[in-house]
Amino acid sequence: MSRLPVILSVFCHWALFTIPFYATAAEHKIEVSDFGKTSDGASVSRYVLINRQGVEAVVITYGATLVSLKVPDRAGKSADVVLGYDTLEGYEQGKSYFGGTIGRYGNRIAHGEFTLDGTTFHLPKNDGPNSLHGGTVGFNKRIWAGVDRSRADAEVLELSYTSAAGEEGYPGTLKVKVTYTLPAEANELRIDYTATTDKDTVINLTNHSYFNLSGDASREIVDHQLLLRAQQFTPVDATLIPTGELRAVRGTPFDFTKPAAIGERIHQDDEQLKFGKGYDHNWALERTKKVGLELAAEVLEPTSGRVLEVLTTEPGIQFYSGNFLDGTAKGKGGQLYAHRTGLCLETQHFPDSPNHPGFPSTVLKPGETYRSSTVLRFSTRK
Ligand code: BGC
């Protein structure tokens, strides 16, 4: 008897189940390539995460930095909505923290000093009298180890870094992981942070992406409509250190409880706006549950129709309107990033918490695991 019908039937079954699997599997992927060497010879890799909906995220192992994020507009046209550089040299020399993972302590610590368990620790003062974003060589300037942990339903990039005890003045050896997850079907990039320590320390991790949802970084972000789910913010002194007060936003230019254009009140005669040279403050987020992700902010760019929702497990968010961009940073495609051409929404614990016992604690102890998650969710509106 001929074996042909059996062979044919086996082939047809194989084709029926295997070909469609490869056809769909090929549509979401992660690709790794070389991004060059740092000035002291360390190799840096570049990971490209692509989903089935036209979203593409590029992350490099230098600073666990998000270097590009392409999302569709209301016509389905994808464009890069974050600022950054084309080259590693740009990131090494850059002073604006574009897309970087910020640590060990995001935002400012007053006078570069804090006391923990009776010992006073001294940090580099790299922002006037204060320490900013982890010091002179923060996590955004370190080399992280990348591992592809992709699943059938998502591209997953895990990056690890061990910060030695005493690095930039902080106590305790800190083992940190940052995981970027791009689901195959949803237009959102999730960032999860975990960390453990061998000695009491302080920690406040965030991502420092500058968004311009128009996809055109030559345009200011002042027409972006912003909503912040916060009834209070933490006012600052002239060096941008919180005074300790939690102030109601109602009746001030800091009220974004209803969507408002960023530029609408930015020039008002307001002491806080003067200190920040615009918005550069921490909002205390309204939380309805103790744990889990909740909506913190929503941004709409009217021309493209792109909408960004930021969800977080953190108690605060720093909204920074790109006030210190001054046209000197030469970004992607040679674009000089001018004043207010990008905005940051840094999910975080409050700035200078180690010196404010009344703020939610940023202390991490041995045996505990620090956890923080943020989701950048994209959609469009007519
Ligand atoms: C700070 C700004 C600072 C910027 C650096 C923000 O998180 O709040 O004051 O200039 O980072 O790019």
Image: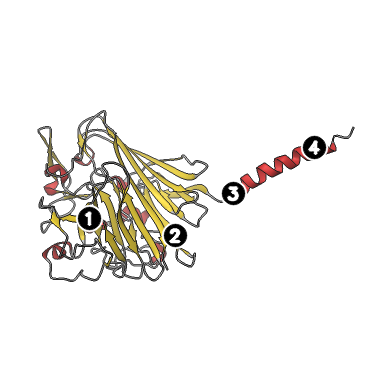
Colouring mode (rainbow / by chain / secondary structure / one colour): secondary structure
Location of the C terminus by quadrant is bottom left
Query: What is the x, y in percent for residue 63?
Result: 34, 47
Question: Cβ of disc 1 within 8 Å of ligand 1?
Answer: no
Indicate which disc, 3 or 2, sits on the residue closer to the N terminus.
3
Question: Cβ of disc 3 within 8 Å of ligand 1?
Answer: no
> Relative to residue 242, is residue 256 depicted above or below?
below
> Relative to residue 156, is residue 259 depicted above or below?
below
Residue closer to the observer: 174 or 366: 366
What residue lies at 83% left-to-right and 38% top-to-bottom?
Answer: 5
Disc 1 packing (10 Å; few <14; some 14–19; many ≥20)? many
Looking at the rendered structure, the kind of residue marked 4 is Ile
Q: CA distance from mark 4 to mark 1?
A: 66 Å
Question: Are the residues at dot 1 and dot 2 in contact (C-beta closer than 8 Å)?
Answer: no
Looking at the rendered structure, the kind of residue marked 1 is Ala
Q: CA distance from mark 3 to mark 1?
A: 41 Å
Front label number (3 vs 1): 1
**What label sits on residue 373 in the rendered view?**
none
Indicate which disc, 3 or 4, sits on the residue closer to the N terminus.
4
Looking at the rendered structure, the kind of residue marked 3 is Thr
Question: Cβ of disc 2 within 8 Å of ligand 1?
Answer: no
Residue hosting label 4: 7
Q: Secondary structure at mark 3?
A: helix
Q: CA distance from mark 1 to mark 2?
A: 27 Å
Q: Secondary structure at mark 2?
A: strand
Residue hosting label 3: 24
Residue hosting label 1: 230
Question: Are the residues at dot 3 and dot 2 in contact (C-beta closer than 8 Å)?
Answer: no
Looking at the rendered structure, the kind of residue marked 2 is Val
Residue hosting label 2: 71
Find residue 230 and report its image quarter.
bottom left
Q: Is residue 41 left or right of residue 29?
A: left
